[in-house]
């Protein structure tokens, strides 16, 4: 008898990779993947609870999907990922609708759990040591849930940073890298499937290999991945400034396949706040690393994230952060209001700010960044750039594309006019004629115009 499974993946792209691996495992065990939850015998929710909003979304999604046990075919509702790992003791008491819980390091058991529940067992917990070595083989069978032309490549699991606002090490364990050979093999398999862009992710990409090779080897990994035939673009996310090496910067500048783009979450820029956050950086170091990136690659796009309203953040500290944002002119920037996380060191600190004040400060920096982003976009007008076609708005006959300067799902788009049909996954040259606050507009340039 054929069994069906439906997946919902919440949270970050690292979670998405875990979901894709689970999809592969379920497929290998004979389950047919369906998009419609009402048609699924098994529903799997891969959860996130990094901040309060993510936790609430996870719980709401679980309760919503649990309705399919009453109205659909669902006989097994499984919850994987951070939520169950974090609240494993009280999980079934709070969410009795769930049949099985799978911890962050136990997702390889997803098919076994599903089959046990379909055979009549319920409230099954699968939890293993969160510090166990990453499985080198499972990712080879993953089923992509992204567009066919790009994929996330998860190079390590866990985190050693222990920032005071964060509980990820409690849910994901210490930092563990995958071997370089397994990552190159996976990238090769992805390229055979048509993947042209690799988006390199981890909790902290900058220290890749430190546990296996005694020092960061991200630069060597980039060099080896660059040799994979079919991969045209590579971009790096979640690279910490305090452990970003000059060797990595040099490889980014040297390797033509590496996009001059880096996601480098600094979270704050005031030394006193960084110290309270448990970050190992300071403003001088941040300026030095940003300067090194821009010196090596004058066209680099630096994306960062900030947390405003952290415990005890004063008006003066916030004003200094605003000054830093103005001085650095980040090409891409996102802002979070500080979220008190149960079990974190910061939760026990004195001086928590009111939510209204945190949100006000978030809006101030986002408005500040809007003007910076508009200036950044304006600088692109008149330039010719390579873009990757992602789709089309048929009503307007305009193509949606993305440049080397834009990561999927989080950055802006380049809207393109073309007299000829363009196809998803194609690379084309575009001349930018207009800029918005975050997006660009341009026209396809043919080979004759490029040579003039």
Image (cartoon, helix red, strand yellow):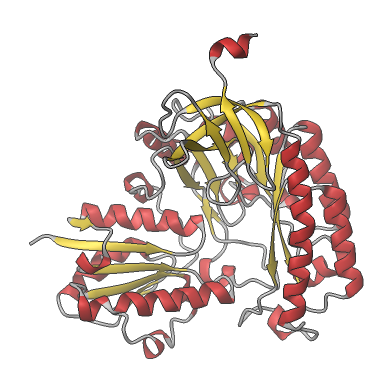
The C terminus lies in which quarter of the figure?
A: top right
140 over 428 or under it: above or below? below
Is any part of residue 244 visible from this angle? Answer: yes
Residue pictured at 72% horizontal, 50% vertical:
243
The N terminus lies in which quarter of the figure?
A: bottom left
Q: Quadrant of residue 422?
A: top left
Decide if residue 161 is on the left or right side of residue 324. Answer: left
105 over 51 or under it: above or below? above
260 over 12 or under it: above or below? above
Residue pictured at 72% horizontal, 46% vertical:
244
Q: Quadrant of residue 220?
A: top right
Most extreme residue toward the left is: 1
Residue pictured at 80% horizontal, 66% vertical:
274
In x, y percent, where is residue 84?
A: 43, 76
Residue pictured at 60% horizontal, 46% vertical:
412
334 over 376 or under it: above or below? below
In x, y percent, where is residue 7?
A: 33, 62
Nearest the eye: 113 or 307 = 307
In x, y percent, where is residue 421?
A: 41, 26
Decide if residue 416 is on the left or right side of residue 308. Answer: left
């Amino acid at each position: 008898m054929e069994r069906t499974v439906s997946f919902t993946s919440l949270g970050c792209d690292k979670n998405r990779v875990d979901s894709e691996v689970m999809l592969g495992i379920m497929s290998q065990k004979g389950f047919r993947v369906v998009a419609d939850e009402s048609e699924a015998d098994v529903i799997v929710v891969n959860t996130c609870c990094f901040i309060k909003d993510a936790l609430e979304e996870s719980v709401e999604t679980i309760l919503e999907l649990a309705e399919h046990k009453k109205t659909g075919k669902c006989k097994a509702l499984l919850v994987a990922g951070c939520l169950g790992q974090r609240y494993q003791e009280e999980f079934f008491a709070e969410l009795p609708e769930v049949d099985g819980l799978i911890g962050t390091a136990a997702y390889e058991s997803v098919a076994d759990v599903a089959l046990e529940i379909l055979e009549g067992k319920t409230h099954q917990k699968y939890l293993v040591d969160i510090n166990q070595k990453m499985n080198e083989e499972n990712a080879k069978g993953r089923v992509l849930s992204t567009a066919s032309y790009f994929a996330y490549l998860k190079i390590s699991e866990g985190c050693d940073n222990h920032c005071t606002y964060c509980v990820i090490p409690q849910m994901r364990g210490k930092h563990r890298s995958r071997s370089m050979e397994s990552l190159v093999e996976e990238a090769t398999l992805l390229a055979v499937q048509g993947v042209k862009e690799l988006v390199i992710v981890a909790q902290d990409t900058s220290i890749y290999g430190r546990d296996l090779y005694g020092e960061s080897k991200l630069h060597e990994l980039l060099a080896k991945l660059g040799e994979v035939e079919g991969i045209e673009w590579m971009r790096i996310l979640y690279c910490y400034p305090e452990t970003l090496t000059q060797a990595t910067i040099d490889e980014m500048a040297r390797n033509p396949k590496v996009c001059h783009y880096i996601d480098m979450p600094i979270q704050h820029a005031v030394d006193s706040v960084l110290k309270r956050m448990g970050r190992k950086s300071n403003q001088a170091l941040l300026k030095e690393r940003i300067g090194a990136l821009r010196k090596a690659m004058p066209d680099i796009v630096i994306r960062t994230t900030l947390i405003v309203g952290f415990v005890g953040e004063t008006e003066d500290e916030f004003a200094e952060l605003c000054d830093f944002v103005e001085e650095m002119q980040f090409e891409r920037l996102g802002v979070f209001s500080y979220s008190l996380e149960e079990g974190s060191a910061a939760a026990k600190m004195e001086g928590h700010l009111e939510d209204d004040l945190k949100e006000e400060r978030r809006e101030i920096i986002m408005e500040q960044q809007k003007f910076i982003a508009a200036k950044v976009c304006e600088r692109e007008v008149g330039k010719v750039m390579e873009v990757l076609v992602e789709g089309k708005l048929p009503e307007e006959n305009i193509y949606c594309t993305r440049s080397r300067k834009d990561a999927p799902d989080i950055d802006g788009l380049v809207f393109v006019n073309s007299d000829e049909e363009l196809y998803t996954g194609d690379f084309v040259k575009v001349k930018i004629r207009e800029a918005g606050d975050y997006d660009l507009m341009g026209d396809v340039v043919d080979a004759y115009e490029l040579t003039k």
